[in-house]
Image (cartoon, rainbow, N blue to C red):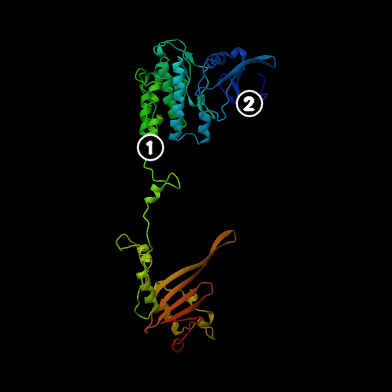
Amino acid sequence: MNWTKGPTVGRGSTATVSLATTVSGDLFAVKSTELSNSSFLQKEQRFLSKLSSPHIIKYIGFDVEYVDHVPMYNLLMEYAPGGSISDVMKKQGGSLDEYLIRSYTRQILLGLDYLHSSNLVHCDIKCSNILVCEDGVKIGDLGCAKLVENNGIGNTSSEFSGTPIFMAPEVARGEDQGFAADVWAVGCAVIEMATGCNPWPEVKNPVSALYRIGYSGDLPLFPVWLSEEAKDFLKKCLRRNDKERWTSKELLQHPFVDLNSSLKKIENFPKNSPSGVLDQGFWDSFEVTDSPAPTKFTTFSGESPVERIKQLAEASPLVNSCLPNWVEGEDWITVRSNHMDESSNVSHENLFTDADMEDGNGESTRSESELYVEEGFSISVRFVLESNVLETCGASVVNSRFLDFIKINNNNNNNSFSLVDSNLNSLLALHIFGDLLLICKDTSLDESHHK
């Protein structure tokens, strides 16, 4: 097969991984190393060439080429555009959410179950050896794999391989490396996916790791944020006694990765949304009003417009239904009183124009309307008309314009109000006499003018 090597996409301990293309433009990956150091690649080639599973990286072929007169061994295999699970973790901030961990773990177990049924122990399961392809995650890097007998139990071969931090206790002690060792590594990989760290982050060197794993009696710490199902799954994987560990086939039935269990949970979930626009049963669940509510007529007593508005609001069922039912209690804090005292009165400068504040001699004068400030105000409401942000001298200044609506108490029966415009620096006097509303921009209105 004619192919062209492209850029390097990864480097391992024994080989370099490059992207390659065929004459027809198909992409695949090439693992390359010098022929003299290619024992691991050749062993992987022998295993991959005999395997065929959607959960194991696909074998394409191998060849030997010369680069600068140096023979290079090339192993051609399926390209994983997503990289490894470790790469996915880095892209997602260092760890994965539990839903994705469940999915990935199930696919890893399916691949392991296939390998174990073929009497193969992978011996180096970890996130960097699980490749993310377009049709799912697949087990790769079988350079440490080995054939076993007796169903993977009691294999006391002198050859032990893999990454120390992911080794099972019996492997660390040099006793056995069978199918149960792969199951221990799956538990470690789940912790790695959940935390972004290896299962023994406090251990700094391989020798210390092997001693602690093999002889301390400790277990890796389970992430506290995982679900109870996830923690129970880890307990089944990370049992120090390899005879008590669940097999890959048994773990596939665990609720943490069992799709049938997950589907049952979804089926039991109450469905409240329609399956389509013609789902009449869903729409029939809503109450339908046959006719609109009849119009309610209300008679009003009194001549005051304020009283009429108050009675109109009280008579409206829509308004009353929307009004909150607030009850004064100890947990309420008064932030503004309806009655203004002298300390909270509006400043004189905002209430009067220059003509009102000074007489011909330049001395301050006051008309009787000043009683509005000291004595006459009972209710005050402020409306914000506009607010602008101005940049000046390197600082931002908020300039707001507002309107104060103030009720004036007087001795007669008239309802009088005042509007104060903060920008105009003047007072607008509103006087309501029954149905007659007068608006004046003069605060020195005398008694006869009001009448």
* Secondary structure found at label 2: loop
| Image quarter (top left, top right, bottom left or bottom right) of the C terminus | bottom left
State the image quarter where residue 259 is shown. top left
Q: Nearer the viewer, residue 235 or 260?
A: 260
View extreme (bottom): residue: 448
2 or 1: mark nearer the eye: 1
View extreme (left): residue: 330
Q: Nearer the viewer, residue 115 or 199?
A: 115
> Does residue 72 appear in this view?
no
Q: Residues within 10 Å of mark 1 (few under 14, many from 20)?
A: few
**Which residue is labeled 2 in the image?**
26
Q: Amino acid at mark 1?
A: Glu
**Which residue is labeled 1 in the image?**
267
Taking 415 as reference, is 393 left or right? right
Q: Residues within 10 Å of mark 2 (few under 14, many from 20)?
A: few
Seen in the picture, residue 222 relative to 354 is either above or below; the reply is above
Give the percent coordinates (x, y) of residue 75.
Answer: 59, 18
Give the percent coordinates (x, y) of residue 337.
Answer: 37, 69
Q: Nearer the viewer, residue 374 or 65?
A: 65
* Secondary structure found at label 1: helix
**How many numbered tags mark residues here?**
2
